[in-house]
Image (spheres, rainbow, N blue to C red):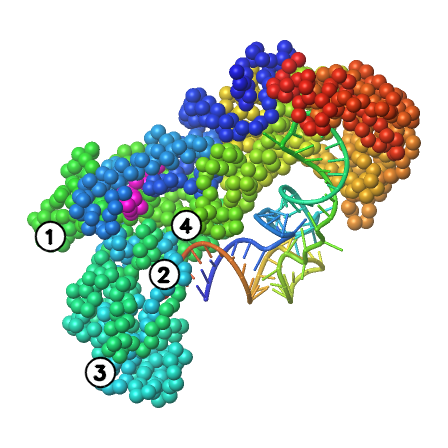
Amino acid sequence: MRQRWWRAVEPGADKEPMSVFASVTPMFDIPALEAEVLAFWQEGAIFEEGLRQRASAPPFVFHEGPPTANGLPGVHHVLARAFKDCILRYQQMRGRRVDRRAGWDAHGLPVELEVERQLGFSRKADIETYGVERFNQLCRESVSRYIAEWETLTRRIGYWIDLGDPYRTDTADYIESVWWSLQQIFERGWLTQGYRVTPYCPRCQTSLSTHELNQGYQENVADPAVTVRFRLRERPGVSVLAWTTTPWTLPGNVALAVGPAIPYARVRQGDEELIVARDRLGMLTGPYEVVAEVDAAELVGLRYEPLFPEAAPPGDAFRVVAADFVTTDEGTGIVHTAGAYGEDDLVLCQREGFPVRHTVGLDGRFLPEVAAFAGLFVKDADPRIIEDLEARGLLYRAEEIRHTYPFCWRCDTPLLYYALTSWFIRTTQLRDRLVAGNAEVAWVPPHLRDGRRGNWLESLQDWNLSRTRYWGTPLPIWVCAACRQLRCVGSRAELGLDPDQDLHKPFIDTVTLTCACGGTMRRVPEVIDGWYDSGAMPFAQWHYPFENQAAFAAAHPADFICEGIDQTRGWFYTLLAESVMLFDEPAYRNVISPSHVVDRTGRKMSKSWGNVVDPVAILDRSGADALRWWFYTTVSVGQEYRISPERVHEVVSRFLLILWNLHVFLITYSRTCGFDPTPGAADGERERRTVMDRWVLARTAEAVQIVRRRLDAYDANGACRQLATLVDDVSTWYVRRSRSRFRDDRDPVGARVACATLYRALTQLVQMLAPFIPFMTETIWRNLAAGQPQVARSVHLTDFPEPDQDDLDPELLAGMAQLRRLVEAARPQRQAAKVAIRQPLTAATVASDPLPAELEAILAEELNVRAIVHAPLPPDGRPTATLDLTLTDELREEGWVRTIARRIQDLRRLARLEPRQPVTVVYGAGDRLAAAVAAATPQVARQVYADAIRRQALAPRPAEGRVSEGILDDQPYWVMLEGLPGARNDPGPAPGAPDPDPPPGERP
RNA sequence: CGGCCCGUAGCUCAGCUGGUCAGAGCGGGGUUCUUAUAAAGCCCUGGUCGCGGGUUCGAGUCCCGCCGGGCCGACCA
């Protein structure tokens, strides 16, 4: 039967007669440990217990940003969740009630597209044909399917959030709350209809908001760039040249714009004359002659021949006008204007009274009016248009340009700038209040607030809220067919609907209202931007204001949110905007926003690059603790995370194994010395603490202070850096210096004091680490808590450590720091002189601030000198320690003995002996060396647990058994353990030696 | 074009309010210590802390300019 080695066994079954601890072993299967912990949490309902325990405590309010469940979660999703979880666990340990409700963004284009893919649809019309009701039902189901995948990962990484009662943006209650909010905004006059040019996806057939646009820019897109002749009507032989990268907008041309302050020129080239900006003469091909300089004012009002007369709209058009937005950075300094396909163009046309008419339909194909290209998709029409212009002598020049161009963030279709009637929230009017609201928020990293985020708010656009799609919250605006009166509905009651009525399309479109004028009101066809839904979660998750008004009031604004940097203009923005509009305050107080996860070379991860790092593979190999710790410590929040499985795995050996082995060490020796951590059991031992004990406790108390300060400031990086240093200090300084005390069987009280000290430091350390690496800390906690019914059964149910005032000791910390610097300063001297550290020396001359006697004793031991000679501090104030490297015979002999002893210990280790298993040592050496050994035999024997140390002839050395041999100051020797055959030099178990499993410390 | 971030040893990164700050880890080379450690300590890999100015008694650490990288905006008619 295989022991479940990572778990403490019930006391009594396996324990030392004197010990409350069950044995534990070195670690090797972290994923198995984590699976065990997950099962423990599940079976013990630890998460629920934590909430219950703080039920009446002051709340710490957290909002979970609802992921759109339309695909599998990636490693970057683990990143934000790691930071969320550590703050939430910390706050709960600090005594706050931390309700944390999961949420799912169920609406929106991403979900629709996923379903369209499944159904093999390529056009929006396919959805209508298929039936909107069935389609929406599939959307709802698709979300539910992916939610299951997200829940699996959420649990696996130890992200504690209540998955049992999530909010979903597609429920009727949620939608009703959103309607309520839109009615508020409508009544304040901020929700309006407008005819504007917006980015438009001809495949999805909906416009997009500016904050969706940014996600879809692609670099280095090749597009045609054409320069076209516009022939002046009254001046035969003279053309105005205009430049565009969208030839498909040329049939829609209605005007040419010149800059009022830009100087122009008329040039002769061949038998024609051309007008361009003087600064842009360089774009002309071939020789030319400037005929005249022309002011913009002279050009304004000139009429020209339409390029495509058959498409020309009725009314006034085809004139040159002045416009401020014209520049001479590109093109000819004269701008082709098509009212329906450019923001500036539309404004200009409306000002000048030019007709604004579409030449392209909602599907991105030319309308019948443009006979030559009717039915062609605009991008496909570009080359045909160029050919046509060429054939008619209107094309001056055609090239290819590479530039950045927006594509649909979900379906990769090139976007068109397209004039549409849309519903907008006039956020530009609210800019000052949004900026003021943002100023109240604390960001990690701090520069985001006034940097990227603040900057973005300054250049805010109106929020294009409506989407001409299907799966979303219906825009609750009804229009009277008779008098065009608008009404924004804010509740189901206004429509006379049951609470359990589904509110989606197509049902909602069948609901009519009667207008005050007696006419019939019908709903507008649009749904709303899914980002609005998620921004509504602070109130909509509560079905506010219809229910839970008190709960909402108590939970707004939130203390803390955390999402990736990409949410600056996503959720961070919509939360802020909606909260400011509705409640006149920001929705959150503190934000952590980690940067992107990229591959090991700094490239974005993308499926087509083949460099996507799979979180599951990392979790299976290194575990969730390792991945989490890597995120907390590898770089500061705000820097890119260059991830690779190897880098994450380093955490295991560099950090997790050391931590684990600290507790293995403690338990091993607690079992041998009979240490009992039960309060009261160690009474009276405090007075016997050594300076090392006091130091490690002071160091821990200091770390508690620092970690609390850092986490209170949402600085997980700072907290973890401190904890990493603490683990290193405990392991490589306290335990290393104190090892002999733990195993000193002549002083069991002293050993128990050491154990009690390490127990105290380690339990606090593990508690501090629990928010970050919740799995391993849980196992260690339970192993340490074994047999103590009064101790919390989970580390996550404990209170975060307080800095113990009695333990704090800044002077001791400073003294030890100086001591360690002195030791480091001295060691290179031995190396240079090739004198081993185990070789005792007479003295070291130390120039430093005076150290207390007990620290000086440690210094002498670390330096391995018999005396410390004091010297004045050098002028530069830098403490030094200078070794006297003179060797006497006596010193040499002592060094020999220590070498022999070390060789014996090494043989014990290689033979995998138990710590106290007695052995018989035999050795061969010359007389001088043997005399030194003989003189020190009692000490050596005790040190290496030898019942006898016997000398044999130097030659021949034994052929059997594992022998260690060497030369000390020209004197050859060998040493071996008697009765332990197995001569090979490998560290495998020697035949006859105890089986390596179970581990050391397990049997009496 | 504008905003922000970054540019520190071969690699990945720390360096808070200016004065032991010239560091850590990894890799490589060397060495030492050790029965908790699939460990650890130490040394080396000799870094003009991107470049140039400035402020200061003193600047990776503050200011200005420039170069390079990243992100975000704007523009892309």
In-front residue for pair A856/A906: A906
Q: Which residue is mark 3?
A: A233
Give the residues in magenta: A103-117
What residue sits 68% from the left and 19% below the top? Answer: A991
Q: Nearer the viewer, mark 2 or mark 1?
A: 2
Q: Nearer the viewer, mark 2 or mark 4?
A: 4
* Chain to which the residue tagged by mark 3 belongs: A
Q: Which residue is mark 4?
A: A608
Mark 1 or mark 3, earlier in chain: 3
In-front residue for pair A685/B42: B42
**Do the dots labelled 1 and 3 sit on one chain?**
yes
**Residue type, numbered disc 4:** Ser
What residue sits 53% from the left and 20% below the top? Answer: A4
Q: Which residue is mark 1?
A: A481
Q: Position of residue A98 (x, y in %)?
A: 43, 32
What residue sits 36% from the left and 71% below the top? Answer: A399
Q: Which residue is mark 2?
A: A405
**Do the dots labelled 2 and 4 sit on one chain?**
yes
* Chain to which the residue tagged by mark 4 belongs: A
Structural crowding at the residue carrying mark 4, measured as other residues with C-alpha within 10 Å and reported as few (<14), some (14–19) or many (≥20)? few
Real-space Cα separation, disc 2 to disc 1, in angstroms:
40 Å
